[in-house]
């Protein structure tokens, strides 16, 4: 099966330019392609995983990925999919975030000699001469055509700054530069990038007289309508300091039944026959599929050892087995306990609530339990008697918990 068919079967492809010629190109030669990442945070999150997995499939099929870090474009911010102007970042912050991305992408892509590239578009964008850029590149863009782009039309209602209006030109210029420097013929990205991708391919045809191609991925939400990688507690990060491997594992373990087959197809390398088998499980049996999903995705992001630890921790708490030492925990001192720690304080300290007001809401709604005993008293204090063998278990809802150790 060709890599294009693999991507289609697994659900990666939303739109393509020149589908038949692109299919033939991917079959007959090693194609250099790129996906862009604007380093607006110091970690990738679950929402980035779909393009990263597509890049990995392409690389496994013999093609060469370029991960382009937007050190230049992040100085402006892409208006695509946004209703407001993005916060502008300093060059130092962008450079730091880019370095963080490098180490995380290396879990999925082989950056050894000739296998993949990572470049920063700041290398060619930050030194541009504005008048030369307008003369050499801007003349190929029609304002009328740019105004028809969906990403622009959405922002026109609230106001689109000129600095953002330039983004399409800069992203197109990235594609042109990568084509010139590395022979890059294909750009891949989220479906909100369709207009920018088309503009870049068109620029290459106009300036270089060469064909260039584009592929977009679907913009995924969960079956419950939530954006991928978003939870009540915030984003699910690939950085273990921001989202622990266990929390990462639990995000996937708690997937909606309706999403399991799709997630197995997109976020793991399991053969599709196995994906279909697991995705067809129902009722209690679907938990087997969820456990496989959580393990496989965590193994890719954090390594097999961390995936095993997370799996054992989940088994210890929910399955009556496993390794209790792998269960995540926070520590509480005797002094803190003596100061009259309340259930609201403990929820915040255990990172099950962002604030006391959120903790108060959780308790009021009946969503908090200590050692499986539901708590309804907002003034409930934590006592030494709550600890069994120096530990207590605090739960938020049915699936989020934290072990608290008394030291």
Image: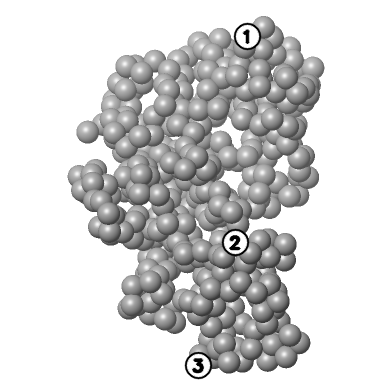
Q: Which is more foreground, mark 3 or mark 2?
A: 2
Quarter of the figure that contains the N terminus: top left
Q: Residues within 10 Å of mark 2 (few under 14, many from 20)?
A: few
Q: Which is more foreground, mark 1 or mark 3?
A: 3
Quarter of the figure that contains the C terminus: bottom right
Question: Would you name the residue on which mark 2 appears?
Answer: 365
Please tell me whether mark 2 sits on a helix, a strand or a loop: loop
Q: Position of residue 234 (x, y in %)?
A: 61, 53
Q: Which is more foreground, mark 2 or mark 1?
A: 2
Tell me, yes or no, if residue 244 can be seen here.
no
Answer with left or right where residue 49 lies relative to residue 176.
left
Q: Residues within 10 Å of mark 1 (few under 14, many from 20)?
A: few
Check contact, mark 1 vs mark 3: CB within 8 A.
Answer: no
Q: Residues within 10 Å of mark 3 (few under 14, many from 20)?
A: few
Check contact, mark 2 vs mark 1: CB within 8 A.
Answer: no
Residue 145 circle label:
1
Q: Earlier in the sequence, mark 1 or mark 3?
A: 1
Write the residue at 56% across / 61% down.
243
Q: Position of residue 29 (x, y in %)?
A: 32, 27
Question: Would you name the residue on which mark 3 appears?
Answer: 389
């Amino acid at each position: 099966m060709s890599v294009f068919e693999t991507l289609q079967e697994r659900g990666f492809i939303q739109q393509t330019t020149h589908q038949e010629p692109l299919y033939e190109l991917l079959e007959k030669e090693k194609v250099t392609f790129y996906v862009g990442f604007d380093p607006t945070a110091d970690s990738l999150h679950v929402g980035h995983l779909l393009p990263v997995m597509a890049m990995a499939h392409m690389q496994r099929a013999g093609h060469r990925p370029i991960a382009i870090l937007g050190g230049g474009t992040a100085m402006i911010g892409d208006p695509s999919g946004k209703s407001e102007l993005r916060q502008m970042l300093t060059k130092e912050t962008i450079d730091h975030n880019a370095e963080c991305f490098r180490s995380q992408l290396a879990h999925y892509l082989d950056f050894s000699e000739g296998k993949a590239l990572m470049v920063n578009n700041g290398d060619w964008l930050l030194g541009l001469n504005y008048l030369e850029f307008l003369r050499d590149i801007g003349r190929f863009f029609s304002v009328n055509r740019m105004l028809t782009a969906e990403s622009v039309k959405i922002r026109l209602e609230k106001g689109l700054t000129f600095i953002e209006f330039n983004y399409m030109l800069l992203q197109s210029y990235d594609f042109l530069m990568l084509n010139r420097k590395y022979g890059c013929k294909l750009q891949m990205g989220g479906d909100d990038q369709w207009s920018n991708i088309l503009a870049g391919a068109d620029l290459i045809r106009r300036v270089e007289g060469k064909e260039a191609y584009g592929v977009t991925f679907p913009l995924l939400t969960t079956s419950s309508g939530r954006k991928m990688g978003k939870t009540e507690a915030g984003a699910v990060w690939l950085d273990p300091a921001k989202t622990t491997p266990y929390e990462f594992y639990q995000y996937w373990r708690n997937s909606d039944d309706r999403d399991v087959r799709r997630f197995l197809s997109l976020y793991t390398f399991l053969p599709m026959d196995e994906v279909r088998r697991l995705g067809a499980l129902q009722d209690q049996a679907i938990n087997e599929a969820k456990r496989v999903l959580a393990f496989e995705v965590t193994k890719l992001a954090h390594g097999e050892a961390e995936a095993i630890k997370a799996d054992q921790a989940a088994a210890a708490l929910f399955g009556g087995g496993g390794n209790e030492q792998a269960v995540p925990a926070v520590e509480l001192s005797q002094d803190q306990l003596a100061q009259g720690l309340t259930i609201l304080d403990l929820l915040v300290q255990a990172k099950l609530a962002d604030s006391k007001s959120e903790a108060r809401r959780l308790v009021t709604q009946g969503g908090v339990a200590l050692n499986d005993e539901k708590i309804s008293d907002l003034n409930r204090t934590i006592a030494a008697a709550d600890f069994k063998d120096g530990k207590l278990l605090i739960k938020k809802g049915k699936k989020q918990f934290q072990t608290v150790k008394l030291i």
